[in-house]
Every structure is written in structure tokens, then in C-alpha cells.
């Protein structure tokens, strides 16, 4: 079984400032890692994913994340945020078996202030 | 590509009625579809995993007689909330897994159910 912890439930940040959203996971097996964004009353959109290879993953909208196996972390970063980045962000993991069900963190509300 | 639709986007019903929510993969074949429930300001909780042509696998605590799932084709899964009550009010989201992109789930836009 896997679990995901997003320590920050809310992150306010000023426009054009950098941001980091933290994600730690726990698993007894190797996992795949994902970040999703959810705008109000909408479904989830994939920002980026780590399957294997380079630990630095680049996604859409200027976001990137780094997989750190020793710290079991997959923090999301963006060097300069925009008002339009205001949304809920979910970190998720799945095992590498046949089921590959996603386990989500509790989410982080990113609010970009003008 | 990889678009998933849900219908309806929102529904309001009286207590005791049944509501059907459709999830369609528009441009790919989905051997597996997932149904999630999301309460306000909370994360997504997996309700069930649906494989085409077979019975759905429900997560612990989810009543299979309450939430009927049918996955009759590779592009359509339905969730029926039977005898809905106010506590069933929630945001229901489906996702579909592409046969070729096995590692990724594509999410629908969600259905807001309000039971009066």
C-alpha cells in the first residue's frame, strides 16, 4: 500500500514569485509519481509524471518536479507563478503492478496574489 | 487526444431517486475506468475500478448495491447512484486508462450531484 503526504494545505504566494509545493510518499514497492492540477468544479489535469530515468521532470505550464528516492519526495516547483496558476494541486502515486491505482495526497491550494 | 467526458456535468435530484452518470473515452479505448468521489476541499477517494466486460472492484467501505457500475464497452462506463440520499451529494469524477498509455489515467470533468 502507498500513502501520500502533502504537508501544506494552503500556499499563498505573490505573482512572479517562485513556489514549491511539497509531496512525500510512503511505499514498500517502487512507484510512479504524478502531479495533477484541479481548477474549481473541474476534473484533474496532469501536470507531469515520473516513471523512470531522469529525476528532474518537466511538465506543462512551466512546472517541474524532482524525484528524490532517499527522501521519498517529489516536490513541485515553478520559478515564477501567474495569477492563472491559482488552483488545487494533487500529488499522487501508483504502484508498478497491474492495478496501478492512484493514491492521492490531500491537496494543496495554491493562491497567487497580485 | 485522450479526452474523457462525463454526463451530466451537474444534477439535482430528490431523495430516493436514482441517478446515472456516464463516463466516455472519446478518442481512445479504455480497458479500465475508475470512479472517484470528492467532498468539498478534500482529495479524491477511489470508489471502484471498472474493467470492460467484467464486474467492478469496489474499495472497502463502498456499497456496491448503492453505487452500481457498468462497463459494457471500451468507451463507456456508467455509475448509478441508487436511492440517493443527501449524504450522497458529492463531486464524482471518472478516469480512464488507455491501453497504450498504461501508466496514465485521463480524467473526466466531473459530475456535481446534489440530493435534496
Image (cartoon, coloured by chain):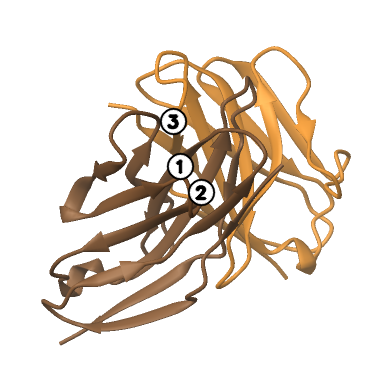
Residue at 72%, 41% in the rendered image:
A1
Residue at 31%, 43% in the rendered image:
A48
The image quadrant that residue A18 belongs to is: bottom left
Tell me, by letter, which chain the rendering colours brown.
Answer: A
- As drawn, B101 above or below B40: above
Looking at marks 1 and 2 on the same chain, the residue that comes earlier in the sequence is marked by 1
* The hue in which chain B appears in the rendered picture of the protein: orange
Badge count: 3
Q: Give the residue pinned by disc 1.
A: A33
Real-space CA distance between mark 1 and mark 2, rounded to the nearest whole angstrom:
6 Å
Q: Is residue B96 visible?
A: yes
Q: Is residue A48 left or right of residue A3?
A: left
Q: Is residue B94 left or right of residue B1?
A: right
The image quadrant that residue B50 belongs to is: top right
Q: Give the residue pinned by disc 2.
A: A92
Q: Is residue B40 left or right of residue A15?
A: right
Real-space CA distance between mark 2 and mark 3, rounded to the nearest whole angstrom:
11 Å
Q: Give the residue pinned by disc 3.
A: B104
| Neighbour tally class for label 1: few under 14, some 14-19, many 20 plus, Cα within 10 Å | many
Residue at 46%, 15% in the rendered image:
B29
Q: Are marks 1 and 2 in contact (CB under 8 Å)?
A: yes
The image quadrant that residue A79 belongs to is: bottom left
Q: Quadrant of the C terminus of chain A?
A: bottom left
* Chain name for mark 1: A
Estimate the x, y position of residue B104 in percent, counting from the top left: 44, 30
Amino acid at each position: 500500500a502507498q500513502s501520500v503526504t502533502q504537508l501544506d494545505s494552503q500556499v499563498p504566494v505573490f505573482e512572479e514569485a517562485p513556489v514549491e509545493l511539497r509531496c512525500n510518499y510512503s511505499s514498500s514497492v517502487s512507484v510512479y509519481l504524478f502531479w495533477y492540477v484541479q481548477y474549481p468544479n473541474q476534473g484533474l489535469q496532469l501536470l507531469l509524471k515520473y516513471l523512470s530515468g531522469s529525476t528532474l521532470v518537466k511538465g506543462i505550464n512551466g512546472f517541474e518536479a524532482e524525484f528524490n528516492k532517499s527522501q521519498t519526495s517529489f516536490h513541485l516547483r515553478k520559478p515564477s507563478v501567474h495569477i492563472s496558476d491559482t488552483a488545487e494541486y494533487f500529488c499522487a502515486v501508483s504502484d508498478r503492478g497491474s492495478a496501478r491505482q492512484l493514491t492521492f495526497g490531500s491537496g494543496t491550494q495554491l493562491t497567487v496574489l497580485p | 487526444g485522450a479526452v474523457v467526458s462525463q454526463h451530466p456535468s451537474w444534477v439535482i435530484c430528490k431523495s430516493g431517486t436514482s441517478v446515472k452518470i456516464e463516463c466516455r473515452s472519446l478518442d481512445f479505448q479504455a480497458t479500465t475506468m475508475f470512479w472517484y468521489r470528492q467532498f468539498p476541499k478534500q482529495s479524491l477517494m477511489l470508489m471502484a475500478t471498472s474493467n470492460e466486460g467484467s464486474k467492478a472492484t469496489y474499495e472497502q467501505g463502498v456499497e456496491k448495491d448503492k453505487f452500481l457500475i457498468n462497463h459494457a464497452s471500451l468507451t463507456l462506463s456508467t455509475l448509478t447512484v441508487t436511492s440517493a440520499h443527501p449524504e450522497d451529494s458529492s463531486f464524482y469524477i471518472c478516469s480512464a486508462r488507455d491501453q497504450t498509455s498504461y501508466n496514465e489515467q485521463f480524467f473526466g470533468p466531473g459530475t456535481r450531484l446534489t440530493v435534496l
